[in-house]
Image: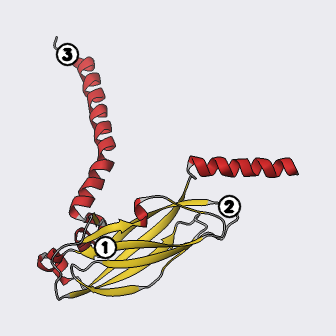
Amino acid sequence: MQLSGPTKTVFQTVGLVFVMGGLAWASVPFYDWFCRVTGFGGTTSVSEVGPEDVLDQTIRVRFDASLDRDMPWQFTPMERQMELKIGETGLAFYEAYNPTDKPVAGSASYNVAPYEAGGFFSKIDCFCFEQQVLQPGERVQMPVTFYVEPEIVTDRDAKYVHTITLSYTFYEIDLPEEYAAAEKAQQDEESNLN
């Protein structure tokens, strides 16, 4: 069956809409994968252990912390910068504090600047891998374990990087079900007392 005229145009248009919708749907996971593989956009790598090679060259790592506009926490790096050998495992801490009178859940996004260094900055362990819930008045120190890949010194662009900035931004997210249920039960109990 061969289509012609307006029927063919309708089928082509519907087909184009499906193709474009599929590409739009696949673009977010593809872009995320691309950034993780290449370090594009300052996305870091994830590793389970540090490299075996530690170079004599050093690199400075700066730490930055910020909050989304609606996030009620206080969030700061425990130290602003450290210098370590390329390939050496570093450990830094960030502190978060919930000054409110209710539990607040948060999730951190991160990036590395300059972007050329993103593919060479690897995290072994990080608080950004999971959601954080702070109770009212709770203050916690959250670690990030990382290293800079020795291959950075031979990369065409990244070999000129001498300082890397690791930035985190915390966003408020919905409380997990168990916390939300406990919070609702407490609110119900308080309203029954009044």
Q: CA distance from mark 3 to mark 2?
A: 64 Å
Badge 1 crowding class, 10 Å Cα cut-off, few under 14, some 14 to 19, many 20 or more, is many
Q: CA distance from mark 2 to mark 1?
A: 32 Å
Q: Which residue is mark 2?
A: 102
Image position of 29 (left or right of 110): left
x and y, in percent, of residue 153 in the image: 14, 80
Amino acid type of disc 2?
Lys
Residue drawn 32% across and 37% down? 21
Vertical side of 11 occupied by 26: above or below:
below
Give the quadrant of residue 82.
bottom left
Mark 3 or mark 2, which is nearer to you? 2
x and y, in percent, of residue 28 in the image: 33, 49
Q: Which mark is residue 3?
A: 3
Vertical side of 74 occupied by 19: above or below:
above
Q: Which residue is mark 1?
A: 146
41 and 164: which is toward the camera: 164
Q: Is residue 157 visible?
A: no
Residue drawn 21% across and 82% down? 86
x and y, in percent, of residue 20 in the image: 29, 38
Amino acid type of disc 1?
Phe
Q: Dividing the image into 4 quarters, which one contains the N terminus?
A: top left
Amino acid type of disc 3?
Leu
Q: Earlier in the sequence, mark 3 or mark 2?
A: 3
Q: Which mark is residue 122?
A: none
x and y, in percent, of residue 62 in the image: 37, 82
Q: Earlier in the sequence, mark 1 or mark 3?
A: 3
Q: Earlier in the sequence, mark 2 or mark 1?
A: 2
Mark 1 or mark 3, which is nearer to you? 1
14 and 36: which is toward the camera: 36
